[in-house]
Amino acid sequence: MKTFCSKDCPDFCDFYIEEENGKPVFKSAEEKNGRNGFVCSKLKDFYEREITHGAESDPESLSKAAELIKSLNGSEFLFMRGSGSLGYAMGWWDVLFSGIKDAVFIEGSPCDITGETAHEFDFGVCDNPPAENLKNADSIIIFGRNAKVVSQHFFSYLLRLKKAGKRILYIDPIRTETAPSATDFIQINPACDGLLCEAYLTEDSGRRRELIAQTGLTEAEYNLFAGYIKKGRTAFITGFGLQRYKNGMAMVRWINRLAVKTGNESLLYYARGSKTELASVPKQPVRRVNISLLPDIIEQFPLMIIVGANPAVTFPETDKWHKALEKVKLISIDTNITETSKHADVFIRAGGMFAQNDVMGSYFFNDRPSVRGKFAALPSDSELAAELAGLLGVRLDITDPETVERKAPPSRKYTEKPLESAYPHESEGYRLITGSHTSYLNSQVPPSMGENDAFVFISPETAEKEQLTDGSNVEVFSPSGSFTGVINVSANIAGNVIFAYKNRKMTKGYINCATPVILTDSGNGVAYYDTFVNMVRK
Ligand code: SF4
């Protein structure tokens, strides 16, 4: 059957899946403006994790969950839904719990919300132009999107554009897997992309020199950047990493301003709502608590319900999360037993994306939404939500994916508003930056990957200063907590940055044990990369 991947990397790929001798066989869908054309290497890992090694089902779990919710007798409880799968059907959980007046939702997200807020502020909407517009660009500047890892099909499209003569400049504080494929690479100081854009736009040469000095770029590197923009039509592609700093919204807004002021608005890309062309699920108004209050606020509630999320690994303050989840009653709805669902009083096994008929559009490509059928014979999220609604006596009328109403896509309208210089937040110690891995998404690590690459990547300067070599065991700590990992000295890392693959299980602990809760300047996102740590040899 033809289906699509609803995982939250931006590509939204179509593919074919069939069963042969009890095993899935994946086949690629035809290439279309950068989407599809080959099977992404992560797909079989998702199947391995969610279906082959998915959790056992407890046939009583839904009735146990209903009893637990009913036993609250009107006390408020917390509800959190993750975005590990972005399909429309996950929204039926929101509809169900919005129909229960005692459910308290979370305001904010750890993912892309800061950049989204920046686009809505500047353009009234968060949308992308068609990917085909890139064919009209003479060059492409990528700010902090490690496309080779996070966006495999888009990366292959970029390579084709490069072959067709486009020059690609990649700017990132880490020399990632994407850097060797760009025409040019500039290693910028973390959180300085906004200052770089401002340097280009200012007419005051003294001010420009000041700003360039902050970015850590040489004059030649700045001239390379400026030359890209001056020599013709330039596309700007903004990654999610740079909105995970305290000044993330301001940085994204400076990139927006640069694109508009240089006449390249139709070549400015960030992301778009994957459900933007679909009528919203009929959710009722809800009460919310801000994401920055997590996990401390959890113990004020008798119950927390977590759907498709693993905050004990992916959110800051891992140790506090474990303590909070020990104290609260927890209903976890997921495909696998995770660090979060280990604490569950009731665990409901969901079949995941292979079991869910669904509809959605792309998170990046401006294509019309696709519809998919159910492949795996396991309970889907919408089926589980409907059954739980029945047990709770809540009305939930689920719309078939084929009949979800389509809306006209919104369009951008730029309004120039005040924008301050986007200076980075600095503190004592090393800046901890995390990044995506080619083999997994968020904390969805396939079992076959094992647990043997708990690397802490440091720069050669840091190695010399701390007298550390490859293979040294270190404890990385901050006031929030610590984790232990294995040193890998890498020329891909510069200055005082420490890099690790995100949400990975380390030799001891998880990366986010050391991450404090800091909000970005949009007030609803998490500034993961403003985590400052120190190291001690173990
Ligand atoms: S690139 Fe992303 S959306 Fe596409 S199949 Fe792979 S994981 Fe899914």
Image: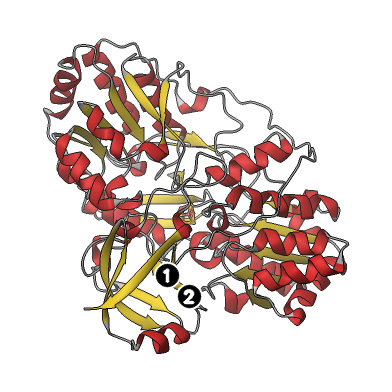
**Residue 505 in view, yes or no:** no
Dot 2: element: loop
Q: Looking at the image, which residue is at 59% across and 79% down?
A: 180
**Residue 354 in view, yes or no:** yes
Compared to 12, does 125 lie above or below? above
Quick check: marks 1 and 2 in contact, CB under 8 Å? Answer: yes
Answer with left or right where residue 431 lies relative to residue 101. right
Dot 1: element: loop
Q: Position of residue 486 (x, y in %)?
A: 28, 78
In the picture, the disc for residue 429 is 1
Compared to 94, does 351 lie above or below? below
Answer with left or right where residue 296 lies relative to residue 118. left
Q: Which residue is mark 2?
A: 496
Q: Looking at the image, which residue is at 18% across and 20% down?
A: 66
As rendered, which of 308 and 403 lies closer to the eye?
308
Mark pair 1, 2: CA separation: 8 Å
Q: Position of residue 189 (x, y in %)?
A: 59, 70
Which colouring convention does the figure follow?
Answer: secondary structure
Give the number of the mark in front: 1 or 2: 1
Answer with left or right where residue 449 lies relative to residue 43. left
First-in-chain label (1 vs 2): 1
